[in-house]
């Protein structure tokens, strides 16, 4: 999941497309979220004419609560569904915003930009591409999509508008590339109906489904198939409850009140008449699925005939947690259908090479720019485009922060500004930087020792025994741990008492720090972080 | 990778099979390795007749250096190759051992146990199964294997001995189950020859191969194919250098001195005449591959025409690191062949369902016990055995530490002893426990604050400003960070000065600790670990 944000700029005006969050990578210890760095916009706020949200996924709108306060007068444009989802998020954070509904049938004019919207299919309804006309050239903004001709939500892909864009001339096309490593076309979401029918037929007890909460189409399939087989549905987890509420209101989900069961009343029904829709398909720590698996969920305990379906794919980095959760569910007696034994439990919302090639051939842009993937997926997209007939220099593979200039039918990378990962940790936005992360990394591996030395500077002696505490280093209650810390006290006294006369406190501090670090490494093979305080009396 | 160790016990004697290490899971912060818990053997050392190593992989022999010192007189039996690999490891750690070569043609008698060895194929030569005759029943110990009829190392699988075991009667068979989630048979290692020929033909510059260093057959293929196409070979990384040395000595690798190039002389040759065999295929931090990708390797810098092949699979938990390494290599201009674009760059050393079913049908044991996998793979093995015709109660699915009794033709789980994960961290073995890990987890997310308070207990006042330091919490050099720490100083003084007269130091400490924790959470949303020292003057 990448924190999507694209800035389109003319001398007069700025248009922003998407404002998403990213998940921290494994080196960002303790970080909750990553948001885009908008320092580039600092002195340009008056130029910003609007933010358009392409569709209702967190990696495309989730940073609004963090960034809108810095861009207070900027209107946010989105489809009905995306607007509803974003609005809920903003309300939660008590952020006021100027939210405006996009009328897909009309051209949206924002300063120098004239934007036409093109409906596409993805894993959430109302996903849109944009044709952006500017005085300097025309852009096709092809965010997340696949060509699903039989989508659950009956969306018609506006292929004709893609051709129209091509006729008007597209200088540069940005295109989703996340699935460019895969040959062929991505399956239709409709394929899941048969799969869910097959799986539910195996369930002798409760049918438990976990999937990405944002995937409204998948939830619809799980609900429809469950109702058709006479099951009531219980919603487990806040994100599922919230999205189902919105999906119902906008008509994307049909779940009559009489078919929904409160979580606490699930046991009033026979197990084979119950479906649970559970949030946390990536086994995120603290999610409903994680708590059910680790037997800490208040309402749901696994029973021997429970049948659990993971209708999801591994997001890189989550494999171990998901596999641990599967093991735990199975140990409690549940039967589990998951990706390693059935590859068909999930279809992606992103187009494979076939879909990507089709978009290129419909839009026929002069230049290409893959987005939404890592460098390896950008590279595969580039190789695909070259096989289609593009010259390599017509495909731009920028890094985050690169500036691309489009003018007179040409596009190229012309510069860059510094775009950091802005990390959100607790209430802090951007106050966790590399120094803090590096310290956390050391603390996580080696632990910490705090040493307090009271110094009689005249006599150059320690006044009392130095106080030495540790956490995450050695266990202080066991013999070895205690011994190491008391040896460390002696080591400190040895250094102080052996120090030359007139040594500065600063130099003495360095000497103690050094010798403690060496002492711990030679006795334990570890390098705990040493926090040393010297008090002169 | 599981830390394999199996204890077979009669009233008189004990036989141990394998003595391996495991990798720490993601919650074991800072832990280097995990080794088996042998506290069960504590008062039984005199009964132990020997340790048999099934094959030369770390998860089967790697704990010897840690555990042999506690079992000093116990002989270790292994094949020539496994013995050579284990011996090197023991020498590195300066551990003396009674190492004995297995003669596969003879029955090995160790107290109550009579062991016959059955050669099988795996991703390292000389892998063996064991038929273990005991006074209480016969065991077939089927550690890691697949049925590779055309192995690189020309091993013949001793199928006839499997049938022989069946004729003698097998009460319980332990069987590798790691790949029980896959249908069909695992491919032969030989398949890689064609794949490497295909890949090397694409390489216009250096051909860079990374694979598990322990996979001698894969190294042989890489070397043979490279030499056939006129390339010299350079070895990158200690584990590769060591294993190639052993492989050469025992005749498993044919790499004449004149075809090997020293790493520092690689640039004396044209790029298209060079192959690099690089250790660190899982992008382990600090490995040669990791350093090459992150541009910190002293000798190897990526060049635009370099062609890198990842001949490996993701080990769960390593996906992000591997993908980051691939991105970095590509950004530097290398072409990279990897698992997400070509599934055929690696074949497993473990049998799929076909192999597993074949072994069951050859050995025809009464009871089955899947080993070497997580619970989900054990469960799939059980389902496979049930499809073959076994009743569910003939398949044992124990947890680590469970005791299985075999007698009079029956096998069942009859008890358990506590088998912890013994963690190795630096020089410490077993001194990192759950308390230390829990502290490291908190430190890794939230950081640490050390506060030192000097107290005049009579006046109940702080003598000087409290000293407050932090690491991994907020960055102390920026305005907000500094401010929070100086506000924390004031908070401490407020608590001390407001404390009731006659309060005990202990109660005062609790009050300061509580109020600091609340203060940090309310101002930052974080809960750093607070190390508080009170000094009474």
Image: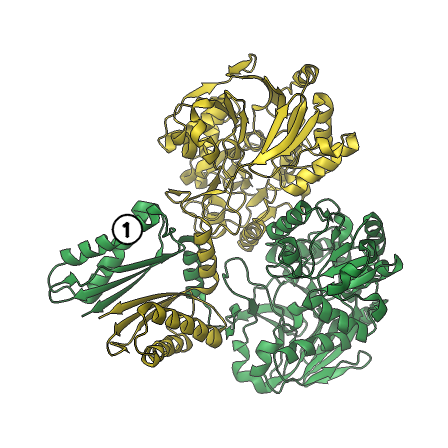
Chain colours: A yellow, B green
Position in image of residue B62 (x %, y %): 63, 72
Q: Which residue is mark 1?
A: B518
Residues B236 and B397: in front is B236
Residue visible at 50% across and 16% down in the picture = A111
Please tell me how crowded label 1 is: few (under 14), some (14-19), or many (20+) other residues with Cα within 10 Å: some
For the N terminus of chain A, the image quarter is top right
In the rendered image, the residue lying farthest to the top is A106
Residue B295 in sight: yes
Please tell me in which quadrant of the rendered image residue A118 appears. Answer: top right
Please tell me in which quadrant of the rendered image residue A181 appears. Answer: top right
Q: Is A22 left or right of A181, judged from the image as shown? A: left
**Mark 1 falls on what kind of element?**
helix
* Total numbered badges shown on the rendered structure: 1
Position in image of residue A201 (x %, y %): 63, 38
Residues A156 and B452: in front is B452
In the rendered image, the residue lying farthest to the front is A502
Residue A193 in sight: no
Residues B247 and B52: in front is B247
Above or below, A335 relative to A380: below
Circle 1 marks a residue in which chain?
Answer: B
Residue visible at 74% across and 79% down in the picture = B115
């Amino acid at each position: 999941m990448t924190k999507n944000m694209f800035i389109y700029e003319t001398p007069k005006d700025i248009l922003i497309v998407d404002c998403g969050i990213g998940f921290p990578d494994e080196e960002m210890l303790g970080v909750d979220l990553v948001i885009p760095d908008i320092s580039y916009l600092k002195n340009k706020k008056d130029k910003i004419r609007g933010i358009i949200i392409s569709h209702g996924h967190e990696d495309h709108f989730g940073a609004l609560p963090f960034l809108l306060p810095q861009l207070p007068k900027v209107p946010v444009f989105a489809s009905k569904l995306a607007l509803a989802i974003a609005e809920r998020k903003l309300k939660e954070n008590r952020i006021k915003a100027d939210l405006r509904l996009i009328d897909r049938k009309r051209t949206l004019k924002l300063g120098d930009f004239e934007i036409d919207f093109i409906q596409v299919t993805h894993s959430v309804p109302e996903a849109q591409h944009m044709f952006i006309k500017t005085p300097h050239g025309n852009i096709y903004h092809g965010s997340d999509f696949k060509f699903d001709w039989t989508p659950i939500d009956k969306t018609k892909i506006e292929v004709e508008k893609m051709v129209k864009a091509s006729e008007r001339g597209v200088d540069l096309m940005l295109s989703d590339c996340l699935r460019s490593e895969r040959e062929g076309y991505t399956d239709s979401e409709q394929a899941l109906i048969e799969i869910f029918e097959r799986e539910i037929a195996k369930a002798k007890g409760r049918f438990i489904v976990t999937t990405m909460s944002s995937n409204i189409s998948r939830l619809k399939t799980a609900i429809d198939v469950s109702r058709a087989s006479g099951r009531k549905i219980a919603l487990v987890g806040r994100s599922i409850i919230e999205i189902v509420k919105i999906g119902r209101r906008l008509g994307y989900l049909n779940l009559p009140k009489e078919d929904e069961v409160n979580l606490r009343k699930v046991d009033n029904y026979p197990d084979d008449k119950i479906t649970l829709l559970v949030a946390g398909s990536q086994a995120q720590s603290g999610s409903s699925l994680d708590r059910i698996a680790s037997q800490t969920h208040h309402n749901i305990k696994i029973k021997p005939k429970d049948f659990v379906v993971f209708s999801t794919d591994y997001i890189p980095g989550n494999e171990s947690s998901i596999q641990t959760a599967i093991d735990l569910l199975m140990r409690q007696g549940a039967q589990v259908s998951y990706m390693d034994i059935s590859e068909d439990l999930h279809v992606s919302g992103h187009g494979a090479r076939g879909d990507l090639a089709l978009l290129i051939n419909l839009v026929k842009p002069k230049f290409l720019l893959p987005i939404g993937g890592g460098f390896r997926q950008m590279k595969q997209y580039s190789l695909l485009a070259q096989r289609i007939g593009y010259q390599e220099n017509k495909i731009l593979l920028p890094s985050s922060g690169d500036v691309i200039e489009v003018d007179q039918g040409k596009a190229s990378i012309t510069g860059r500004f510094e775009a950091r990962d802005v990390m959100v940790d607790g209430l802090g936005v951007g106050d966790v930087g590399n120094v803090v992360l590096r310290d956390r990394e050391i603390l996580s591996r080696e632990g910490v020792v705090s040493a307090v030395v009271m110094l009689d500077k005249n006599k150059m002696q320690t006044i009392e025994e130095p106080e030495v505490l540790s956490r995450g280093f050695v266990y202080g209650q066991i013999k070895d741990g205690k011994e190491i810390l008391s040896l460390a006290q002696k080591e400190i006294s040895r250094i102080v008492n052996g120090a030359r006369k007139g040594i500065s406190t600063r130099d003495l501090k360095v000497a103690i720090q050094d010798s403690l670090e060496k002492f711990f490494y030679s006795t334990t093979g570890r390098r705990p972080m040493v926090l040393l305080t010297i008090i002169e009396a």
